Amino acid sequence: MEHLQIAVCEDNIEEQQKLLSLIENSGIPSETTFFNSGEKLLREYKVRKFDLIFMDIYMNGMSGVEAVTAIRKIDENVPVAFTTTSTDYTLESYRLEALKYIEKPVKSKAVHELLELAQLKKENTPRLMLKIKGKDISVPFERILYAEQKAHTLFLFLEGGEVLQANEKLDNIEKQFEERNFFRCHKSYLVNFAYVKNLDKELMVFSIKEGHNVHIRRESMSKARKTFEAYLFDRTRRMSNE
């Protein structure tokens, strides 16, 4: 079982130690990193680095709500649990899609339930399976911006700037992307619609977050436009129903 990577952002040493004790006694394998301010967490934060963040709301300097607001601009999916002595920010926790809102003193049951939820999310995250240097690797589909084939090397460009290389062909793994928000727009490219900012018909590219462009084969332009528009329509419909 993979260890959960947990961040605890709390400026009170006693509260840090209490939370660490509850995490260690939960029976769920984990590794915990402490931050004594929201500013420090943001300086060191990397997308997908943590499976769960315990965030104190009332801290010196940046508040927990301000820190999570900044995190949500770069990472929409990381689970967050607010810890606080007050219920004043309950509505803010919903706006920021917090997993839980825990009142202090934090109880063992609440921590255990949170770790179980984070573990379940991690285990159930759909992943691409491939071999890299002889090792079986799994990559969450939600991290993949796009895939590019160059000669006999497959490049996976991931959220946060990471790039993976495998001695593989896109044709061999394309089936794993079926029923997901990916589109084979070129013999050498497969794109994740979730990261597309817009489609440039003149340049024949999808403009991707983080400054990338993904080429579209001329013969696929009409299908690319229709499929992307259908994705946007479906996403808007789902959001309006939430």
Image (cartoon, rainbow, N blue to C red):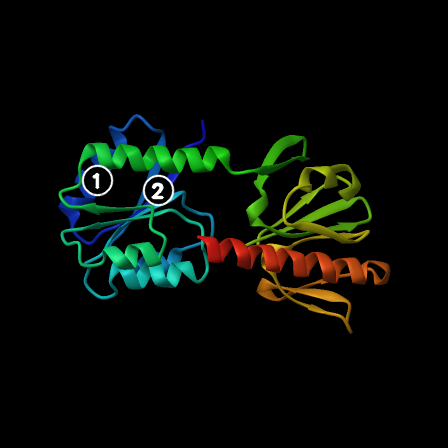
Report the disc number at residue 19.
Answer: 1
Q: Can the viewer see residue 160?
A: no
Which residue is identified by label 2? 6
Q: Between 126 and 49, which is closer to the camera in this rendering?
A: 126
Give the structural element (helix, strand or loop) at label 1: helix
Extreme bottom residue here? 202
CA gap, disc 2 and disc 1: 11 Å
Q: Is disc 2 surrounded by few (<14), some (14 to 19) or many (20+) residues within 10 Å?
A: many
The label on residue 70 is: none
**Quarter of the image with the N terminus in it:** top left
In the visual, does 230 lie left or right of 162? right
- Quadrant of the image occupied by residue 104: top left
Q: Position of residue 107 (x, y in %)?
A: 17, 36
Amino acid carrying mark 1 in the image? Leu
How far from the left and from the top, in percent, is residue 160?
53, 56
Q: For residue 131, say whether it is visible.
A: yes
Quick one: 131 or 203, which is closer to the camera? 203
Of residues 74 and 100, the one nearer the viewer is 100
| Residue 113 location, quadrant | top left
Q: Is residue 108 above or below residue 147?
A: above
Residue visible at 82% across and 51% down? 187
Q: Secondary structure at mark 2?
A: strand
Answer yes or no: do the residues labelled 2 and 1 have beta carbons within 8 Å?
no
Q: Quadrant of residue 65?
A: bottom left
Q: Residue at x 48, y 58 (%)?
A: 240
Residue beneath the point at 39% across and 56% down? 44
Q: Is residue 176 or residue 137 the one in the foreground?
A: 176
- On screen, residue 242 versus residue 218, left or right, reads left
Residue 199 placement, left or right of 109: right
Q: Amino acid at mark 2?
A: Ile
At x 73%, y 41%, the residue is 174
Q: Which of disc 1 and disc 2 is earlier in sequence?
A: 2
